[in-house]
Amino acid sequence: MGRGKSLGETALIYAAACAVGFAWLAKRFERTILTAPIFFLAAGFLISGTGWADPEAGEPILHAVAETTLVILLFLDASQVDLMQFRKQHVWPQRMLLVGLPLAVLIGTGAGYLLLPGWPLVALALVAALLAPTDAALGQSIVTNLRVPERVRRGLTVESGLNDGLALPIILLLAALLGEMATQDAQGWLLFGLGQVLLGPLAGIVIGLAGGWITLHVNRRGWTSRTYEGIAALSLAGLCYLGATAIGGNGFIAAFVGGLCFGNLLQGRCEFLFEFTEGEGQLLMWAAFFLLGFVLLPEAIEHLSWPIMGLIFASLFIVRPLAIWLSLIGTDAAPATRLFFGWFGPRGLATALFALLIIPQVGEAWAEPILVIAINAVWISALLHGMSALPLGNLYARRTEQMGECAETMDVADPFERVEDDAATSPQQIKSGD
């Protein structure tokens, strides 16, 4: 036991050393195809093969880090979206989320039916739902490439910030149904799934609105400061999670819904959330990718088969591109933009962490194959999207430059970057009436 704990701590030492090294060279890496997810997945995988640290000892650490990261990122992503701006100005991400996401699940289920014969339809739909959420962190050089039109970069950012929260209820219900098939307890699993999906949002709405109202109240009276507001916001994310689980709801859905309510009540007074996302939030994601590579990637690669690889490649090259293309029919997106959106939907932390979340529910027969598909999809996507982000981003930028004035170059407000109102955010000005 002591040795296992020691080997687990050794893995954390390596993770910290990798984070320091990557941070020192981050600007240099931005000009290459080496992204943070590729770096940390590879670092964890390589260290697991040395024998200097025990992957099994790192498993409890992975679950703790994964759950913490998921709760915080769901809350932060949702809290930074202005729903009014999103509804009025962001047609492309609206279509990709409300039409493209369900289409990706349906088309992905069909692809699984062809490639994984013998699997029940519910299991195939669950895998398709797990492979539907995207992660902008795997194509970071796209969203930071200033040559790519701003409207396109923001569309990708908005979609990736919201689709994990929208996919989660589908994943939970499908996991509950698959678990029911394994246990033959239809009523019990159905009630469990409905309770998770219905009570989670309820807890998120109550805690998010109450937290936002109190934050505004104490801010106007000058009882707090920007630093402590950030601490309070992160604590609210944890409170949403714990409050939902206490009443039988899903804490991750509660964190997402709570973030939406909290951020939209504050209406632009969330600069502390942006700062955390760009700083400490990055560190959490790096740690999660490292631990995925260290604990789960070796076994996932060992169980990688041709049908599973075929399904992953179909998801990347056919399912999402087709779903996005169809969802954008009737919009002003050019064909090149539809292809660009379709390809740059990398599978990242949400896919892996959601798979970890639902494996206790789906039964032993399906837990391992589903996790193998999810983890292999993440590293394959990290590699392909990371390597293609820089060259394809520049190629697309040249294409839009040749198009001249077009829908892609239109100015559009960003729901993730609200304009700050100094009079509303300064307690001293509020109290003095300035």
Image (cartoon, rainbow, N blue to C red):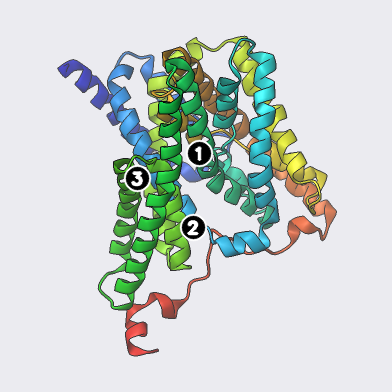
Q: Which residue is at 59% across, 44% downward?
A: 141
Which residue is found at the position 37% from the left and 18% from the top?
48
Q: In which quadrant is the N terminus drawn?
A: top left
Residue 265 is left or right of residue 11, and the answer is right
Determine the CA span between mark 3 and mark 2. 21 Å
Q: Quadrant of residue 15?
A: top left
- Residue at the spot of label 2: 80
Residue at left 20%, top 22%?
6
Distance in Å between CA atoms under marks 1 and 3: 14 Å
- Of residues 276 and 126, which is closer to you in this image? 126
**In the image, farthest residue toward the left:** 2
Please state the horizontal and vertical placement of residue 18, each as a whole percent of the image: 37, 33
> Circle 3 is placed at which residue position?
244
Q: Is residue 173 visible?
A: yes
Q: Is residue 240 above or below residue 407?
A: above
Label 2 vs label 1, nearer the camera: 1
At label 1, the amino acid type is Pro
Q: Secondary structure at mark 1?
A: helix
Q: Is residue 395 visible?
A: no
Please tell me which residue lies in front, 358 or 7: 358
Position of residue 320 measured from the top left corner of the image (x, y, whole percent): 68, 34
* Label number found at residue 46: none
Q: Residue at x 64, y 51 (%)?
A: 155
From the image, tell me which residue sits under label 1: 169
When the figure is inspected, residue 344 is found, relative to residue 54, above or below; the finding is: below
- Whole-percent x, y for residue 324 in the image: 71, 40
